[in-house]
Amino acid sequence: MLKIRNSHFKELKKDKSFGRLPSGEEVFSYNLSNKNGLEVEVINYGAVITSVKIPISKNKKVDVVLGFETLENYIQSFNLPNAPYLGTIVGRYAGRINNAEFILNEDKIVLTKNHGSHQLHGGINGFSKALWNVKNVTSNAITLEYISAANEENFPGQLTTQVTYTITEDNELKVDMIAKSTEDTIINLTQHSYFNLDGQSEDIVNQDLFVNSSKTLETNIENIPTGRFFEVARSPFDFNSSKECPTKIDNTFVLNDKDTVSVILKSKKNNLRMSVYTNQPAIHIYVGGNCFNQIKGKGNASYHPLSGICFEAQNFPDAPNHKHFPNAILKKDETYHHKTIFKFEKL
C-alpha cells in the first residue's frame, strides 16, 4: 500500500453528486479553493479536473479548462471520432506505443490496441475511464487512488497509483502522482487538461506560447516516434521566444531544463499568465478539444479544433521501444513520482 504524507490535511470534506455510471456507481465532485478565490473542481471519474476558475477582477472569474457539465457527456466523449480525454489522468502509458507491444525482461508484452494497430493513452479503458477512490480531501487538496489490476490492458503487475491535486496560496495547482507495482512494468502518467486563458467560447490563437525546448521527437505518418530528434531552431515549432499559439500541433517537446519553467501561456485579453513546471523529460503539446458538434461544453460552448491547448508533461511516447529514450520501466516495489505545477498569475 502506498503511503502519502497527509500531515497537512485537515478533516474537511466537501462533495456533491455528479451522477452515476452505467454500473450504478455514484461519481462525486469536489471543490478546492484558496484565499485568493482560485477554485478547482475535481471528479473521481478519471480523476478529472472539470474546472479551474481564476479571479480576473473583483466580481469576475474565468474558467480556463475545457470540460463538460454532466457525467454522461464525459462518458460519451470517448465515443467521439477523436476522444479528447478532457481533464483526465492518462495511464498506464500516455501517448502511443508502436504496434501495442514492447520487450520487458526479455519477454514480449502485447497490449490491447485502441488506435489502429497501436495503443494510445493506456488502451481501451485505461485510467481515464476508471472510478478513483478518494483517500483524503480538504479545502485545498484531494488525493485519489486507483488500483490497476495485474494484466489490465495486458500490462504486467498490479499498479497502485495516487494523484494529489493541491492549490497553494501562490495560485499554483500542483499535481503529484506516485505509483508502485507488484511486478516490473512500464508507466507514463500525465494530466490531460486543455487550457484556454480567454475562456470557454474563445479560441487559443491570440494567446502567446513559450516552450523551453530546443528539439522535438521526429515521428512517422502515424505520429509514432522514429527514435530521431528534430531541431526546432528556425522552424514553426521554435517557441523559445514567445509567439502566438499554433493552430495545429501534436508534438513532443524535449525539455531543456527540469529546474526552470517549461511552458508559459499568456492571455492579453484577461491579462493572465500560466507557467508550467515539471520533473518529466518532455511535454507533449496538442491543440484541440474538438467535440465535432456532438457534445456541448460548459456554458453551452461548442468546442472545436482551436478550443484549447493541452500540455501533457510526461516521458517520451513509445519509450519502451527505444533504448536511448528515458527509462519507462518501473521495477517491482520501486516508486514512480511525477510532479507538475500549473501556476496562474495576473499580469
Image (spheres, grey):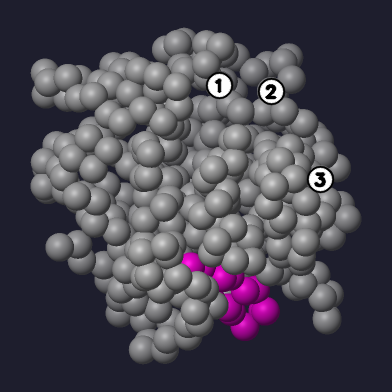
Residue type, label 2: Phe
Residue type, label 1: Thr
Report the side of 276 relative to 328 (left or right).
Answer: right
| Circle 1 residue | 216
* Residue drawn 61% across the image and 28% down it: 250
Per the image, is 41 magenta? yes
Q: Position of residue 333 (x, y in %)?
A: 12, 48
Q: Nearer the viewer, residue 79 or 184?
A: 79
Q: Position of residue 219 (x, y in %)?
A: 52, 14
Q: Secondary structure at mark 2?
A: loop
Per the image, is 254 magenta? no
Q: Position of residue 121 (x, y in %)?
A: 42, 37
Q: CA distance from mark 3 to mark 1?
A: 24 Å
Q: Residues within 10 Å of mark 3 (few under 14, many from 20)?
A: many
Extreme-right residue of the structure: 269
| Circle 3 residue | 203
* Residue drawn 30% across the image and 63% down it: 145
Q: Nearer the viewer, residue 42 or 17?
A: 17
Q: Nearer the viewer, residue 344 or 194?
A: 194
Q: Is residue 17 visible?
A: yes
Report the side of 223 relative to 235 (left or right).
Answer: left
Extreme-bottom residue of the structure: 11
Q: CA distance from mark 2 to mark 3?
A: 19 Å
Image quadrant where residue 164 sits? bottom left
| Circle 2 residue | 237
Q: Secondary structure at mark 1?
A: strand
Q: CA distance from mark 1 to mark 2?
A: 8 Å
Comparing labels 3 and 1, the label whose residue is closer to the camera: 3
Image quadrant where residue 171 sits? bottom right
Upstream in sequence: badge 1 or badge 2: 1
Instruction: Please give the range of residues in magenta.
Output: 32-43
